[in-house]
Structures are given as structure tokens and as C-alpha cells.
């Protein structure tokens, strides 16, 4: 990348990414990101987050001298290393705080995947230590339609495409605080389906759970299956809305739920050291960002009392392209 993007003031510390690497990550993921994502810090930080995932999943993994760092620390390094971002380093705490509160307001879409008996559903477990089980789902990208987001997120987190099975009217929607969550009911998925996430270090395990076990956990945002697995945003979708849906639909198979174990793991990460129960990378067990249209309360394209000036980034990109 052009010397224009370089800076010499970044302090090198043992184990931390060197300037060259930060420059590369900054230009690939941030400066060359979609122009609309450079108009607000809330959106720009999603690009920094992608650079961070690349750092963690590729740079650290392929270079033992690099250490794993938090997104917060990585963001500070990016802002102090990249000259287009450096003018805002004094505001980094506020920028990061605003990003986190924006993140939880972005609508989320996903799927309740039911087996052929409609008596079990598929849940995924997050990667980090103490992570909960939840339906495969994730945040909408800019201008993305709900069902397209659901198909993309389910594919990323389970490796399974629900595009043919998805019916846009079959969904359950719940709003928690300022976040809207829509889950499409995908019914009749074969139990020998092979699942494996496409992203690294996001999902540590995938499992079928019996609905009758999940119904007992109540409707709180967080709950537990009889002292066992922790659940997040599962109960509120199940008890009334899903039960009602199931009672008016005929399953293709009439298995009895008591013949199923409480939970049947279908994929586990091999090298997960933080996710608790999980045991390298992908292993089927059996044969087996935005400015999403938010309400007016959204920070939108403005950030506190100043706007982000993208002209220097665009000039730097032009200069580097013409130099190439
Ligand atoms: P997300 O994509 O921010 O949430 O992922 P969403 O699916 O609800 O939209 C949730 C969490 O999973 C993140 O905060 C990360 O901790 C982790 N994660 C997600 N992805 C796609 C990756 C990835 O590619 N690499 C790593 N290391 N972690 C990820
Ligand atoms: Mg995701």
C-alpha cells in the first residue's frame, strides 16, 4: 500500500501487530470498505471488527509471535496507527461506547430450524467462555431484507442453506428493548443433515434440542435447561408463538419425543479452549452493518458533536490507486 497511509508514531510492543500489518489490515478492511460504511463511526467500527477477526483467525493463528488482543485494544491500535483515523484517537472511548450501544439496536434475523417430527429444534453455542445456546441468527447488513439476512446468517453459523425451505410469512418476531429479532420457522429438516459453521471462532457447537425440554425453561431472555445448558433469547420465541404454529401444522414424521435424547450434538469445534465443553476446527459429529433503517433515535451518520471526514481517506485511496 502507498506510503501515504503509513505512520511512524505507532509504538511497537512485543506480541502486538507490527505497523506493516496494521496498515495492511486498515487499507484492506477499513479504507477500502464500502464508502457508505465510512460515513459514521458506528458503521466504520464494523469494518474494524472484521479486520480484528482476520487478525485473530489468520495472522495470530499463522504467526505464534503475535498475541490475541481484544477488539477494544485492536481498535485503539488501528486508530493510533492509521493516519486517517488518528485525528479521532482522543475520542476513542466515546467512539467505542457508541459502537457498542448501536450494535445492540441493529435488527437481528435467523431461523428456528425444526426436525421432521417438529419436536426438536437446532441451537448453536457461541465461542467464548460461558457462551449460551441460541437460535442461529445475526445482525442485518445495510439495506438487507429480513429473510435474506436470515438465510445468510444461518448459512454462516450452521453451513446449512434454508433458502428453499423458507416461507416469508412463517416467522416469529420479538422486540427486546430497542432490538427487533425475527426468526423464520424452517420446518422438517432431516436429522442426518450435516451442519458445520462457515465462520471461524464464532460458533463452538451445534445441537438438536428437544422442544419439550426447552418449553420448561420459561420466557426470560436468559434461562437454563434444568440446571444444564444456558440459553439466550430462546424461551420468548417458543412457548406461545411456536407452540401455536406447531399445533396447526402436520409434521412429516411422527417420532415420539421421548425417544430423543435431551440434546444431540451434531458439530463441535475441535480446538476451542474457551467455549467450555467443546473439544479443531470443523467436525461433523455424526455421519454425518449500515445504516440499517433504524428509527430516528439512531445515531445515523452523525457522531456526537463531530462528523467523520472521509475526504482524506478517499484522497489517499485515489493516490494509492493512481500510484499502483
Ligand atoms: P457477530 O457477527 O458480531 O454477531 O458475532 P451476529 O452473528 O449476531 O451478527 C457474534 C460474536 O461472534 C462476535 O462478537 C465475535 O465474538 C464472534 N465472531 C463472529 N464472527 C463472524 C467471527 C469471526 O469471523 N472471527 C472471530 N474470531 N469471531 C467471530
Ligand atoms: Mg453472525
Image: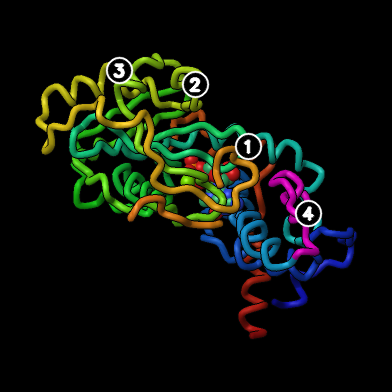
Question: Which residue is pictured at 72% across the width and 44% down the height?
Answer: 72
Q: Residue at x 69, y 42 (%)?
A: 306
In contact (CB < 8 Å): disc 2 and disc 3? no
Crowding near the residue tagged with mark 1, few <14, some 14–19, many ≥20 C-alpha atoms within 10 Å: few
Q: Which residue is the site of mark 3?
A: 239
Q: Which residue is mark 2?
A: 222
Q: CA distance from mark 1 to mark 4?
A: 25 Å
How far is disc 4 from disc 3 in space, using C-alphas?
Answer: 46 Å
Q: Is mark 4 within 8 Å of ligand 1?
A: no
Q: Is residue 244 above or below residue 104?
A: above
Residue underneath mark 1: 129
First in sequence, mark 4 or 3: give its number. 4
Secondary element under disc 4, as helix, strand or loop, is helix
Name above or below for residue 90 compared with residue 1. Answer: above
Residue topped by disc 4: 77
Marks 1 and 4: which is nearer the front?
A: 1
Q: Is residue 277 above or below residue 43?
A: above
Give the camera-side residue of 191 and 134. 191
Q: Closer to the N terminus: mark 2 or mark 4? A: 4
Magenta residues, start to end: 64-79
Q: Residues within 10 Å of mark 4 (few under 14, many from 20)?
A: many
Q: Is residue 87 left or right of residue 109?
A: right
Name the residue furthest bottom.
324
Is the C-beta separation of discs 1 and 4 under 8 Å?
Answer: no
SS for callout 3: helix
Q: Who is closer to the viewer here, 138 or 68?
A: 68
Res 211 visible: yes
Amino acid at each position: 500500500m502507498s506510503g501515504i497511509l503509513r505512520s511512524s508514531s505507532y509504538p511497537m510492543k512485543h506480541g502486538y501487530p507490527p505497523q506493516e500489518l496494521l496498515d495492511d489490515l486498515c487499507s484492506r478492511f477499513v479504507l477500502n470498505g464500502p464508502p457508505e460504511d465510512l460515513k459514521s463511526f458506528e458503521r466504520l467500527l464494523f469494518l474494524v471488527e472484521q479486520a480484528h477477526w482476520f487478525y485473530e483467525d489468520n495472522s495470530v493463528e499463522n504467526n505464534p509471535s503475535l498475541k490475541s488482543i481484544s477488539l477494544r485494544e485492536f481498535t485503539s491500535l488501528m486508530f493510533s496507527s492509521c493516519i486517517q483515523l488518528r485525528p479521532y484517537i482522543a475520542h476513542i472511548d466515546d467512539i467505542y461506547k457508541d459502537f457498542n450501544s448501536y450494535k445492540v439496536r441493529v435488527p437481528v434475523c435467523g431461523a428456528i430450524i425444526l426436525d421432521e417430527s417438529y419436536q426438536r429444534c437446532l441451537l448453536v453455542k457461541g465461542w467464548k467462555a460461558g457462551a449460551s445456546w441460541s437460535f442461529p441468527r445475526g445482525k442485518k447488513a445495510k439495506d438487507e431484507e429480513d429473510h435474506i439476512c436470515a438465510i445468510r446468517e444461518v448459512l454462516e453459523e450452521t453451513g446449512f442453506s434454508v433458502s428453499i425451505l423458507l416461507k416469508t410469512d412463517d416467522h416469529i418476531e420479538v422486540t427486546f428493548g430497542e432490538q427487533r429479532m425475527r426468526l423464520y420457522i424452517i420446518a422438517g429438516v432431516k436429522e442426518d443433515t450435516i451442519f458445520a459453521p462457515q465462520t471461524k471462532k464464532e460458533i463452538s457447537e451445534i445441537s438438536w434440542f428437544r422442544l419439550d425440554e426447552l418449553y420448561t425453561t420459561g420466557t426470560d431472555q436468559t434461562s437454563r435447561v434444568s440446571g444444564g445448558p444456558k440459553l439466550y433469547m430462546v424461551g420468548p420465541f417458543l412457548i406461545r408463538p411456536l407452540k401455536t404454529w406447531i399445533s396447526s401444522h402436520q409434521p412429516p414424521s411422527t417420532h415420539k419425543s421421548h425417544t430423543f435424547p435431551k440434546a444431540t450434538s451434531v458439530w463441535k469445534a475441535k480446538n476451542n479452549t474457551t467455549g467450555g465443553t467443546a473439544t479443531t476446527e470443523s467436525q461433523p459429529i455424526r455421519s454425518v452493518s449500515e445504516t440499517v433503517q433504524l428509527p430516528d433515535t439512531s445515531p445515523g451518520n452523525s457522531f456526537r458533536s463531530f462528523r467523520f471526514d472521509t475526504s482524506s481517506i478517499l484522497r489517499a485511496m485515489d493516490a494509492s490507486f493512481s500510484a499502483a
